[in-house]
Image: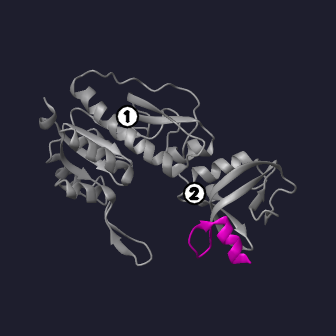
Amino acid sequence: MDKSSLRIVFFGTPDFAVASLQAVVAAGYQVVAVVTAPDKASGRGLKIQSPPVKIAAQSLGIPVLQPEKLKSPEFIETLKSFHADLQIVIAFRMLPEIVWNMPKMGTFNLHASLLPAYRGAAPINHVIINGETETGVSTFFLQHAIDTGNILLQEKVKIDSNDNAGSLHDKLMEIGSKLVVKTLDAILSNTTQAIPQPQGEFPEAPKIFTETCFINWHQPALVVHNLVRGLSPYPAAFTEFNGKKLKVFETKLTDEKSENSGIIQADEQGRLMAHCSDFKLELLSVQPEGKKRMSAKDFLNGLR
């Protein structure tokens, strides 16, 4: 079998999956269908928005399926009609076995971490929140338990001290798209061996909730700084200031000793400083409730 005759069904929804879909097609592989989330209303005007993967698939002329329920008989029959040899899943919801076990060559997933570390929904956020200096991408065959399948290929990525969740997302998206094509090449040429994931205790990456984003200023400055990086630009860490919600997007570590943790105030140099348990942390970019993101300097000017 060659690239053009291998029948692939691609599952994905957000921008992170778009780069891989485009890379697979550019590499000469045949994607016979794309499965993505249903369109939904979003934004202030509640306009109906299509998922990024749907928009990309339509521009490539690929049929798009948007099932509400992945176990519905109608969807299963339609999926079967594409006679996929292989399925690829990237940033999509959990698949039932009847779906991932359908193609004869299996279904593989791209995960944004070096598995088995950081299994879960938010690996990009959690590696930065935890202060890691290295992460990566992994491809693996799906099986029953989420993110536990046999590893195909991995690629390491350095986390720079100035990386936030947004910049690391973009790095992993591009490197991941190349790894997906590399994985396809290896499967097609039978030059890769799926290896079981190591057993043991590893850091996890659960879904981000509102309480995850609340800043505790009574922690060390580095812990708070990494939380802000790991949640920037979305969904963003936040605190309360003058009784209102204040999102914090960017901070700067200092070697200035904190005097009283929990206080946020302007200093004599006009900087917006937060006192943590050990050192002061300079706030550089914030978003007051009901307003746009701005520099801390503009925020202080507005208060004056």
Q: Which residue is drawn at 57% across and 45% down?
A: 126
Q: Nearer the viewer, mark 2 or mark 1?
A: 1
Quadrant containing the N terminus is: top left
Q: Residues within 10 Å of mark 2 (few under 14, many from 20)?
A: few
3D distance between C-alphas at marks 2 and 1: 26 Å
Q: Per the image, is 266 magenta?
A: no
Where residue 244 appears, as percent x and y from the top left, is 69, 73
Question: Within the image, what quadrant is residue 150 found in?
Answer: top left
* Three-letter amino acid code at the position of disc 1: Thr
Q: Which mark is residue 209?
A: 2
Q: Looking at the image, is 10 positioned above or below residue 209?
A: above
Q: Where is residue 236 in the image (x, y as percent from the top left)?
A: 58, 59
> Magenta stretch?
287-304
Residue sitting at x 62%, y 55%: 212
Mark 2 or mark 1: which comes first in sequence?
Answer: 1
Left/right of residue 104 with respect to residue 163 in the rendered view: left
